[in-house]
Structures are given as C-alpha cells and as structure tokens.
Image (spheres, rainbow, N blue to C red):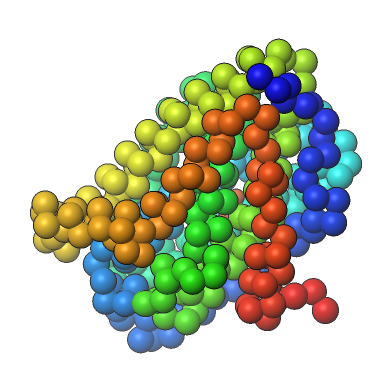
Amino acid sequence: MPPETPSEARSPSDLSIRVRNLQFRFDDATRSQRWWHGGDPVATAFFNALSATFPDGEKFFMDSVRHFRHLTHEPLRSQIKDFVGQEAVHSREHRTFNALATDAGYDIARLEARTRKVIAFGQRNAKIRQLAATCALEHFTAILAHALLAAGSTDLTGAPEEARRMWSWHAMEELEHKAVAFDTMRVATRDWSPLRRYLLRTLTMAASTLLFFWTIGANMASLYREDGLNTPRTWWRTAKYLLAEPGVLRRCFRPYLQYYRPGFHPWDHDDRALLAQTEARLGLAAG
Ligand SMILES: [Fe+2]
Ligand SMILES: [Fe+2]
C-alpha cells in the first residue's frame, strides 16, 4: 500500500478559496411553487432533502475542522479560515432557501431536527473521527458538485434561474474547498501509521455513507408523505431519477469509490478548469 504522505501541500498552489458574500432573492413565482424544481415532486424532494441538512451539517463541518486549526501551517491555515467563511455563507443562504419550502407548507423543521439527531450521534465520537466524517461528507458534496456543474448536466435544468444560480454557486465553492478538511486530517494524523490513517478514512466513509443515505431517504419520505405521495410508485420514479435520467447518483458512483483508493487525495481529480468555467458562467470571476 503506498504511504499516505503527511505533507500539507497536495492541493494546487494556484488555488484560491474565495468567500463570496452572495445573497439570493427568489421571485414570487418561485416562492408560490411548492414543487419549485420543474413542477416535479421527486426532483424537488431530493434538493429540499439535501438543503435541509446543510445549515446544521455545515456547522458540524466548520467545528470539526476548526478544532485542529492550531496544528496547521500556511497555506492550509488560511484555507481553513476561507473554508469556514464559505460554509457560513452557504448555511445562511440555505436557511433562506429552506424557509421557502416551509412557506410552501413543508415541515422542514422536522427534517432539520432529524439532521441534528444524526449529528449529535456523530459528536459522541472522538474529534478525529468527527473530522474524518467531515472529510467523507465533503467528498460527497464535491462529487455531487462536480456532477451538477459538469458539461451536459441537466440536473438543475427545470429549476428557476435564481435557484439554479444558488445551487451552482454552492457547488462551485464546494469544489474550491474540497481538500481543506482532508488536508487538515492528514496533518492531524501525521504521526499515525499509513494503515491506521487508511482505516480511519475508509471505515468512516462507509459509516458516513449509510448515515447520509438514511438521512436523505428519510427526509424525502417525510416530504412525499406530506404530498400524499409516499408510495412504491414514487420511489420507483425516485430510483429512475437518481440512477437513470438525469442519474446524478449513477454519475457519482465511480468518483465515490475513488475515496477508498490508498493514497487518495481530493485534488487527484483536477477541477480547476470546471471551476473557472463556472465562475465565468455565473459572472463571479475576480476582476
Ligand atoms: Fe457548503
Ligand atoms: Fe463544504
């Protein structure tokens, strides 16, 4: 097994993690639409289920990484500050977005309470395991982000312009900071044996995968129940939506498995071109 090198510098040297303090405003047409994603209850439930986990989930990520900041050096130390800055803005904007679903009649507070329970369970573990769970979930957000932004993706096509813009901006910043938690974990475990580091990373990923799918699935079931749609037929449509067309989870499967490769690093997959394209498309390139 190749050693997991403990050096801090495996992210690209020209990477910049920018905190863009954006605020999204949704028009009345979007606000009044319960199924805002193209009138589709399945796509709407998937994105609402994800969004409901973000404010508390991202708070957990920030706390987990910040706990080990004192062990790091530049440039990682500054990257942690920017990572926290980006996640704080994401949380704020998703809170606003979640309020739209609440206004549309969904009990989002119940979904958020579920997320808090799962996080409280995670917080019973040692801090280093919490950091490993953050790395695992940041890998999820990064591969999901890549899938949403990649050329030819139709995952956001049915959504109103401002919602598309918000999800694309969030996805872009997830790619920018995808290695910050990971590099922090490498520093925090630099005295461990390669095997012990590998086991921490991969076993925590396996456990986090189960918890993530359980939470998202339970959230979607809650939303379907409120729509009177929690039926085998809807779940069949859900499976087709996620695995066939547009099939976002199908497209995430191979990149997901990469995480189990010995020596893996998030920047083994270079997303700089996709980042630059997205930044230009959203009119957010630094001028
Ligand atoms: Fe985020
Ligand atoms: Fe993130």
Q: Estimate the x, y position of residue 133 in percent, counting from the top left.
A: 54, 32
* Residue 150 vertical placement versus 80 (above, below): below
- Quadrant of the snapshot with the C terminus: bottom right
Q: Estimate the x, y position of residue 216 in percent, counting from the top left.
A: 34, 47
* Residue 21 vertical placement versus 128 (above, below): below
**As rendered, which of 55 and 217 lies closer to the eye?**
217
Residue at 73 percent of width and 34 percent of height: 184
Residue 19: quarter of image: bottom right
- Quadrant of the snapshot with the N terminus: top right
**As rendered, which of 125 and 107 lies closer to the eye?**
125
| Residue at the outermost right position | 74
Residue 65 visible in the snapshot: no
Residue at 11 percent of width and 54 percent of height: 231
Is 175 displayed left or right of 102 in the figure?
right
Residue at 85 percent of width and 56 percent of height: 14
Residue at 41 percent of width and 76 percent of height: 157
Q: Estimate the x, y position of residue 34 in percent, counting from the top left.
A: 27, 73
Residue 124 visible in the snapshot: yes
Residue 258: quarter of image: top right
Q: Estimate the x, y position of residue 238 in percent, counting from the top left.
A: 24, 57
**As rendered, which of 38 and 147 lies closer to the eye?**
147
**As rendered, which of 251 and 61 lies closer to the eye?**
251
* Residue 274 vertical placement versus 30 (above, below): above
